[in-house]
Image (spheres, rainbow, N blue to C red):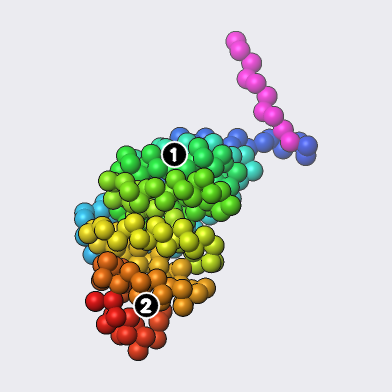
Amino acid sequence: MKRRKAANPDKSGREKKRAPGAAEMAARVRAVLHSRANPEKARSGQAFFKEPVILLGVSATESRALAREIYGEVKKSWSWKEATALADLLLPDPYLEVKGIAILILGRFVKSAPAAGMLSKAKSWLQAGFCDNWASVDTLCPEVIAPLLAGTPGLLRQVQDWSLSGNRWVKRASAVSLIPLARRGIELNRAYANARRLFASRDDLIQKANGWLLREAGKTDMKQLEGFLLAHGPAIPRTTLRYAIERFPAAKRKQILLKTK
């Protein structure tokens, strides 16, 4: 008869708790979120999306709290590798909230990951349709992609090139990923160059993201934003323009709208 292997105690003599693996944690995330499902909230949440999105009806506050709880349990035993494995398991899930948890947890580890490899991985998720709505894209970009870009010109150029993609989610990510830098006045020339490339898009989700990027770029230099908008006036979709000028005083917004017709 085989003897049971003794548990490995820590220095205090207590048995060490085994760290959960990615598969175990993925099952837990699904179980917890499904237990908190709210069909009424799921139905009302659909109003924020033009395309059908599969929702459980779990609030963003609850989701972020769950992500923090899980991170607290694994932060000492996991690295970016386990967090990426969790994302690989959860991002293909049809439910929006499940995808969100995966992204939020990965975001806690992403700065220690190889930047080029992680950027490639993020793009593959977008291309595969695992982030096929504005909410998932707008979580992935600031949590995972943007932290990889600061001080890395080569990766910034790659993300700029996404603006030429035929995939709407990759294209939207080219704008949203630059927003955290732009709002701090970093790499503004790249932000404006990226915006020019996106003017040709007739997709309203791209136009809105582009306007959002321009609005944030203007935070540190409103004069530069105004000059850019006046210089490119008729080429700018009106949806993009209206988003871009939101922080100007009312009289200035009216003036820019008239001058850019």
Which x, y percent locates residue 66? 48, 54
Question: Residue under circle 1?
Answer: 121
The magenta region covers 1-10
Is residue 97 among the parts visible in the rendering?
A: no
Mark 1 closeness class: few <14, some 14–19, many ≥20 residues within 10 Å: some
Of 75 and 58, nearer the camera is 75
Question: Residue under circle 2?
Answer: 246
Kindly give the residue lying farthest to the bottom in the view shown.
251
Name the magenta segment's main secondary structure.
loop
- Name the quarter where the C terminus is drawn: bottom left
What element does badge 2 sit on?
A: loop
What element does badge 1 sit on?
A: helix
CA separation in Å, label 2 and label 1: 34 Å
Residue 240, placed above or below residue 125:
below
Residue 21, placed above or below residue 37:
above
Q: Quadrant of residue 172?
A: bottom left
The amino acid sitting under disc 1 is: Lys
